[in-house]
Image (spheres, helix red, strand yellow):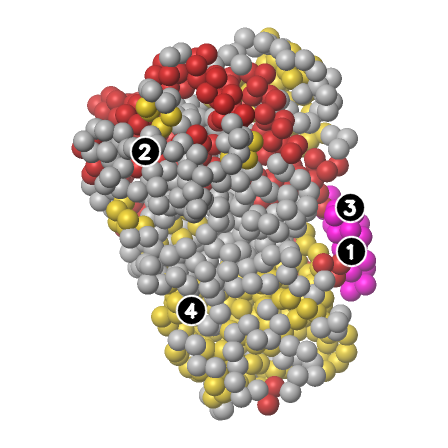
Amino acid sequence: MFRSFCFISSMAIFLFWGSCSVQKTPERITYVNKFIGTAGNGCISPLAAVPFGMVQLGADTRSYSSGYHYDHNEIQGFSHVHKSGAGCGDFLDILFMPLPQQTNTDSITELRSEYWKSPFSHDKEWSLPGYYGVNLYDDQLHVELTASKRCGLQRYRYTENGAMPLIIDLEYGSHSACTIQSEHDVDTVYYSFLEMVDNQTIRGCRLTNGFAPHQHVYFYTVFSSPIESFTLYSDNIKQPGVTQAEGLNLKAIISFKKGETLEIKTGISAVDMEGAEQNYLTEVKNRSFETVKAEAFDSWNEILSLIDIESKDTLKRELFYTSLYNTMLYPMLYSDVDFRFRGPDDKVHQTNGFNYYGAVVGLWDTFRAACPLEAVLCPDIIQDYVKTAIEHYKYAGQLPIWTLAGAETYQMIGLHSMPLITNAYLNGIQDFDKELALRAMVESAMKDSCGTSMGYFVGLRNYKKYGYVPCDMEMEAVARTLEYAYDDYAIAQFARMVGDQENYELFRNRSFNYQNVIDSSTLLARGKMKNGQWRTPFYPLRSSHRNDDYCEGNAWQWTFFVPHDVEGLADLMGGKPVLAKMLDSLFTTGAALEGESASGDITGLIGQYAHGNEPGHHTIYMYNKVGEPAKTQYYVHKVLTELYDNTPNGICGNEDTGQMSAWYVFSSMGLYPMDPVSGQYELGAPLFDKTVIHLPSGKDFIITAENLSSENIFVDEIRLNGEKLDRTYITFDELLSGGTLNFRMTGKESSM
């Protein structure tokens, strides 16, 4: 119902406005339903952007989270920088809001943010990758958005010839950012500037604090029509005759000569206004709206065509390509066309020719599947991402933990630049300074103190001293111990591959520190105090969001975060049969959570398995390692078909910058990087009759599923390049070499 509704609405409006017909739209991008995940807690925004671009230009229905929610019925403007799909929202910078033609702008003496809004309906709204459109003011105005990497384009088309007024709001921004400074719980403007350069050009900037301690957004805007009037507002009050101002609360109302169409081109930069202008001049000055839109369509069609799937189920195909689209929004570009960028030290630097992807570095989420997927499909992007991490280290003294707007936020736990670098290397992405990379990994993993997050200590002082993080010394101690241990393993793997035996042994030994928080009496991960005693009393089902021994989870969800040593975890518990029974209990224990402030991120529950949050994304595949692959196949199919759907509520947790979708892409193809630095993909059960991965090398990796049906969800036999597999995994090298992987499906559990 939802897809049919969207498709008919889109086609009708395209034809009515004469923009371009759906029939002329490249085929692959029409499979993407950008409204999946825009309701509930999916945090998706149906914005206009290109793959990995700096600009995410979209409609705001709210001034927090992703800026958009499907249940809302008013639009308050179109901002140029979003963080679509992330749990912690921010940005929403440089807001434009067109006004009705009949607005008497001369009478507006006071101008407040979010006052001017327009109702809209979803049957007059549509979106394709790289494009967004909506009708406002009872269909009197049609708004269209598209984007290049660093520029956003808007086109306003009125039904009549008349005045074309609009608001630019530099006070407006995310009002509920995740902050590392408790005294600033919202987007706080420290400085803004706005200037009318000439009768068709304006420029300005916003310097703010929110999730990150410093955020710089500079812009340079050129209008297709001459400016007839330019009225500045400072602290909401009209400032007649002023064409340039600086302050904490700046807005403007701009009116243009009478017409029906206004086109707006805006370059943005984190460096300076000159950088924004140069981005505009290079990317869009001599390109029409239609040309930029077509180029955006082409860029998305190209990247979505890296994987072909065959399925009679059109809804599954839509979910697959929508998921692939969501994954490819990140990492997010942060350098200008001249390769200048703003670093974690709040200073301007320049790369030696690679793109700096430091705008959103959400590695706590994406190291698991999103980055590994891009390492296969887009190695050039991941190569620059690795170089970005190393460049960050040069100016911050450590590799990125969770970076926003180029600045370190320390918001989440672990040191997941380590698996990013190691996974890239395992995928053949090796054109970076490996000696410097290892030095950065080692120094980052040896730092006593990194900083603070929400007032809490972040660093490895206690982890190094005790071999675990004592729960009476740090928050989220169990989760930190488990993640540090995994990251140690990632360093060890990299050290081994580059020939550093000393660091290999050091960090391999440290990777077993997870054992120090597994309680042999309960078989669960449990808080341990600095005196070596377990925390008591112990409540395995209890959660207190960001204020307990776990991170956005409880003991059941975190016990299994040992993807690098499943056999060792099994030995601690008494053998693989015991671990298998514990996995069974994870999925069959009641789904109720204990605690008055249980984390809202614990969603998508099957028993206590929480698919809506990332720490458990590998867990289903652990059944392979304990000799019960049929249960991997069963639960993978259950999650794919029950916890993802094609509605606005179709994501069971927030998208987290591509990770939820990357899990779907990998798992629906029949494989998953359970441990991204192992060099192996665990095998599940494919959702499609045939999948073809077009590798950058020019080779294809073809996955087929014989006898696949809604009943035949189990695997009877697997053949790799015609040879029967006696294992439940394939290697990275086997996939990258191209070939065929054939699953023969059955309706009964099989030991394969």
* Residue 596 in the image: above or below residue 77: above
SS class, disc 1: helix
Q: Quadrant of residue 386?
A: top left
Disc number lying in front (3 or 1): 3
Q: Point out the tag, 3 or 1, that comes first from the N-terminus.
A: 3
Q: Point out the tag, 1 or 2, that comes first from the N-terminus.
A: 1
Residue drawn at (41%, 45%) of the image: 545
Q: Point out the tag, 3 or 2, that comes first from the N-terminus.
A: 3
- Looking at the image, residue 49 sits to the left or right of residue 272; the answer is right
Report which residue position mark 3 lands on: 1
Magenta segment, which residues? 1-28
Report which residue position mark 4 lands on: 206
- Residue 151 belongs to magenta span: no
Report which residue position mark 1 lands on: 9
Query: As rendered, which of 110 and 574 lies closer to the eye?
Result: 574
Residue drawn at (33%, 19%) of the image: 520
Under mark 4, the amino acid is: Arg
Q: CA distance from mark 4 to mark 2?
A: 49 Å
Disc number lying in front (3 or 2): 2
Q: Point out the tag, 4 or 2, that comes first from the N-terminus.
A: 4
SS class, disc 2: loop
Disc number lying in front (3 or 4): 3
Disc number lying in front (1 or 2): 2
Q: Which percent across, then down, holds residue 492?
A: 30, 25
Q: CA distance from mark 1 to mark 2?
A: 57 Å
Disc number lying in front (1 or 4): 1
Under mark 2, the amino acid is: Pro
Report which residue position mark 2 lands on: 537
Q: Quadrant of residue 348?
A: bottom left
Query: As rendered, which of 469 and 688 lies closer to the eye?
Result: 469
Residue drawn at (33%, 63%) of the image: 183
